[in-house]
Image (cartoon, helix red, strand yellow):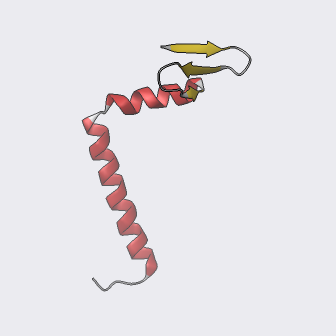
């Protein structure tokens, strides 16, 4: 159960004690949803970033 705290403009959970802004709450809900396509996209992006880091390092030996 979430309660809204007007002075701080945050949501508080009675069960777990989380205290989140509206944006943080939206992000948490999106992450909890667990979109499989998003996971694949993140994995591909991480692989590309790793390759770019390797390429820019100048150490081309495998």
Q: Nearer the viewer, residue 7 or 52?
A: 7
x and y, in percent, of residue 58 in the image: 43, 83
Q: Quadrant of residue 40?
A: top left
x and y, in percent, of residue 46 in the image: 36, 56
Q: Is residue 5 above or below residue 38?
A: above
Q: Quadrant of the C terminus?
A: bottom left
**Among all residues in the image, which is located at the extreme right?**
7
x and y, in percent, of residue 4 in the image: 61, 14
Q: Quadrant of residue 49?
A: bottom left
Residue 10 as seen in the image, left or right of residue 40: right
Q: Nearer the viewer, residue 30 or 12?
A: 12
Name the residue: 32% across, 39% down: 38
Q: Is residue 41 above or below residue 16?
A: below
Q: Quadrant of residue 52?
A: bottom left
Count of number-bearing discs: 0
Q: Nearer the viewer, residue 34 or 5?
A: 5
x and y, in percent, of residue 56 in the image: 45, 75
Name the residue: 45% across, 30% down: 28
Name the residue: 52% across, 15% down: 2
Q: Is residue 44 above or below residue 12?
A: below
């Amino acid at each position: 159960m979430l309660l809204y705290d007007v002075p701080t403009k945050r949501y508080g959970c009675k069960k777990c004690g989380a205290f989140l802004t509206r944006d943080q709450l939206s992000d948490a809900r999106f992450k909890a949803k667990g979109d499989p396509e998003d996971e694949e996209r993140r994995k591909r992006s991480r692989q590309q970033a790793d390759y770019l880091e390797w390429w820019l390092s100048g150490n081309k030996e495998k």
